[in-house]
Image: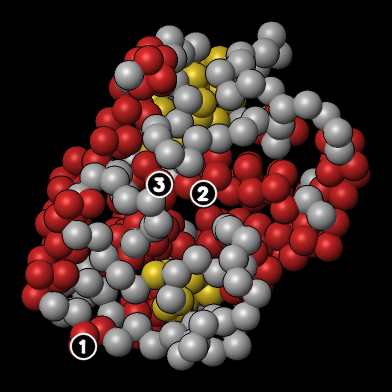
């Protein structure tokens, strides 16, 4: 979610969608998808939430390489009523929310190069599709994403998008979940990253704290490196319930002018799974 040009670029529709143009992908681009898919799908069982692993089946296309959005959308539509639409890159906030509210997930068309294997600044098709789409095949998470889009449209009218963006970041992109007696991954930014799939669960550096909506909205996040704090939900059902049943307007009003918590802070009232050493971030800062 980024503030960019207010009108769609040449070749895009009014809602910023463009043809995926699947036939234009090269053999090297398909091979990159296959490499990334194999690497992540081998390492994630036991680490990612069961619903994500089950949802990976929706990405097993009849053609090799990068998924064809038409076929993928047909599978998703039958499962949860969602579809995947191609966009040229980042889209304005309101466009993003409108798509989510109408059960359309926007995905970029390009795929990273070998030089960008483990880090790239703008999300590519592997992050967008491998990271996000498997959970859209889960009815509860699919409803959460629609509810988030509807909430985003309301937040836009209340001037509170920056607060709500933190909810998306700390759940949809970098969320952890408690499953049984273990923490597992579900955020798209983690499950699509080989390095962060390990870091988020195993490294002693980050804080891992229980999900608290108001506290989360006062917590900034990292856009340039691994997270210094992760929030842990109890279930997708609880996440959906809190999102649907919370009246966000008075919450935004309450938080207006409230100072942010430092990204590394652990508060006395936090449910603490791990109080991190912050060794990773501190070492990077000194480098």
Residue in the foreground of this view, choosing between 50 and 268: 268
Q: CA distance from mark 3 to mark 1?
A: 27 Å
Mark 3 sits on what residue? 189
- Tell me the crowding category of disc 3: few under 14, some 14 to 19, or many 20 or more residues within 10 angstroms, Cα based: many
Q: Residue at image x 19%, y 79%?
A: 25
The answer to which image quadrant residue 163 occupies is top right
Q: Which residue is mark 2?
A: 172
Q: Earlier in the sequence, mark 2 or mark 3?
A: 2
In front of the other: 229 or 134: 229
Picture coordinates of residue 76, whole percent (x, y) = 41, 74
Position in image of residue 113 (x %, y %) = 19, 59
Residue 77 can be seen, yes or no: no
Residue 107 spot, x, y in % from top left: 42, 69
Residue at (32% x, 35% y) in the render: 196
The quadrant the C terminus occupies is top left
Answer with mark 1 or mark 2, whichever residue precedes in sequence: 1
Q: State left or right for residue 138 relative to residue 148.
A: left
159 left or right of 67? right
Q: In this rendering, which labeled residue sits more in front, label 2 or label 3? A: 3
Q: Is residue 219 above or below residue 9?
A: above
Mark 1 secondary-structure assignment: helix
Q: Residue at x 64, y 49 (%)?
A: 165
Q: In the image, which disc is placed on residue 23? A: 1
């Amino acid at each position: 979610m980024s503030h960019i040009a207010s009108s769609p670029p040449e070749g895009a529709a009014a809602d910023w969608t463009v043809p995926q143009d699947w036939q234009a992908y090269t053999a090297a681009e398909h091979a990159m998808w296959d490499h990334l898919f194999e690497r992540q799908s081998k390492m994630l069982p036991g680490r990612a939430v069961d619903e994500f692993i089950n949802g990976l089946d929706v990405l097993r296309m009849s053609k090799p390489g990068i998924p064809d959005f038409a076929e993928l959308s047909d599978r998703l539509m039958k499962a949860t009523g969602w579809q995947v639409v191609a966009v040229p890159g980042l889209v304005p906030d309101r466009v993003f929310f409108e798509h989510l509210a109408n059960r359309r997930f926007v995905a970029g068309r390009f795929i990273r190069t070998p030089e960008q294997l483990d880090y790239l600044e703008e999300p590519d098709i592997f992050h967008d599709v491998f990271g996000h789409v498997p959970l859209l095949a889960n009815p509860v998470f699919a409803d959460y994403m629609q509810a988030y889009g509807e909430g985003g449209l309301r937040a836009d009218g209340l001037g509170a998008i920056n607060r709500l963006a933190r909810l998306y970041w700390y759940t949809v992109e970098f969320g952890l979940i408690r499953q049984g007696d273990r923490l597992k991954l579900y955020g798209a930014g983690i499950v699509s990253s080989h390095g962060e799939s390990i870091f988020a669960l195993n490294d002693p550096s980050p804080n891992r704290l229980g999900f608290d909506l108001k506290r989360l909205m006062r917590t900034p996040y990292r856009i340039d490196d691994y997270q210094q704090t992760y929030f842990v939900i109890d279930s997708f059902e609880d996440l959906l319930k809190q999102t649907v049943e919370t009246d966000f307007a008075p919450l935004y009003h309450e938080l207006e002018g409230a100072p942010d918590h430092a990204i590394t802070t652990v508060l006395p009232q936090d449910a603490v799974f791990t109080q991190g050493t912050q060794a990773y971030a501190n070492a990077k800062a000194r480098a």
